[in-house]
Amino acid sequence: MTTVPNPDDSRSMSGLIALALGTFALGIAEFGMMGILGDVADGIGVSIVDAGHLISAYSLGVAIGSPALIVFRRLPLKRLMLILAAMIFAGNLATAVAPGFTTLLMARLLSGLPHGAYFGAGAIVAQRLARQGRGAQSVAVMVAGMTVANVVGVPASTFLCNIIDWRMVFAVVALFGMLALISITKCVPYLDPLPDTGVKGQFRFLRNPAPWLIFAGVFFGQASVYCWFSYIEPIMTDIARFTVADMTWIMMLAGLGMVFGNALAGKLADRHRASLVTACIAGSLIIIMPAIYLCAPMKIPSLALMFLATAGLFGIGGPLQYLIVRYAKGGEMLGGAGIQIAFNVSNAMSATLGGMAIHHGLGLASPAAIGAPLALAGTIALAILYRRYDRR
């Protein structure tokens, strides 16, 4: 006996894939710069240290753009997503054609503005498109664009940079922003705006402890992995003795871990409490991160543990992007965008912590050990969230 697909399911999936095109573009825009930073520095005639500000400018754009969602709170959700997709296109096109360092810095700031807002509003749209009981999986499909960007987009951007020019990378990102704009137009139905609670009402949810516990889970859970992942190349080449050429497929394996963790956690979060699922994942990192430190010289264990760690990275983030909508009543989009702020601030802090550990002579693999207490803090926050607020 064959099952006839529900036409509503296909329309829903088309809409989710349209949203994922945007997160794919955002994934390359955020992480692609890290792999081509030296080429960008040479291309515009600045030092590698100055070029590093281009990464910071993007993160600053994320932090500025996310709260700006309150300006668009009265817009129908589809129209808001179209505006954000258009900003992805415009910001990355400006990056591709920027003539000098100052204009490139401003273009990177501009391209970061829609990042957190796109995830925040997109999480709400994804849940409205979802079938009953599949909200977390639908958000996971949207987030999957970023995980696929780490598997395919970032290595491809490095390849494009090597054979053509670094500007082509951001031209391609702009192209995917345009594809997202067209796809959202065609595949996402009209969705009513959220109830307008006023400017003050957008922030009222922050009076409750639950959203702060979610932000803490994201912040410490992501930091536990990024302390080590920020230095993955020197750890793998200098300690595990992989070649520089091996880093291409190693990073693809890390990206596959992200895809796996995001998909699995999304399914589990629909069957069980999202806070419980993420608390268990964060708890596993308490063991995984010290194991990475101890097994750093061994090739096969280091690869296996890397896969598990990157799976945990997105296994925590995706379900919490879904869960925050429930605990941010009146400010759902702002709450969703807050997840991305916590994520980006966490990345910056964890890279600094890992660098300090290396600088103070604790060894190149020491950032992995630093990740364990951070994972513990994330686990405690998410366990409290489950026991006090989410268990019922």
Image (cartoon, grey):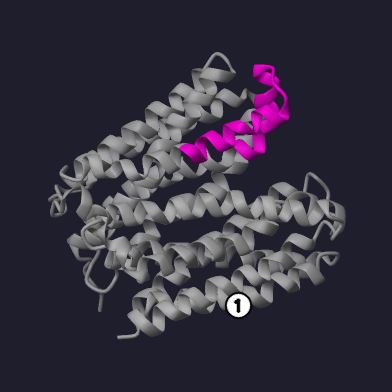
x 33%, y 37%: residue: 85
**Residue interval drawn in magenta:** 33-60
Q: Is residue 165 magenta?
A: no
Pointer 1: what residue? 284
Compared to residue 152, the image places residue 53 above or below, namely: above
Q: Quadrant of the C terminus?
A: bottom left
Number of numbered labels in the structure image: 1
Report x, y in % for residue 95.
50, 24
Q: Quadrant of residue 375?
A: bottom right
Task: Give the prevailing secondary structure in the magenta stretch.
Answer: helix
Q: Amino acid at mark 1?
A: Ser
Q: Residues within 10 Å of mark 1 (few under 14, many from 20)?
A: some
Residue sitting nearer the eye, 381 or 103: 381
Q: Quadrant of residue 331?
A: bottom left
x 38%, y 30%: residue: 89
Q: Give SS at disc 1.
A: helix
Relative horizontal placement of residue 241, taking residue 229 as reference (left or right): right
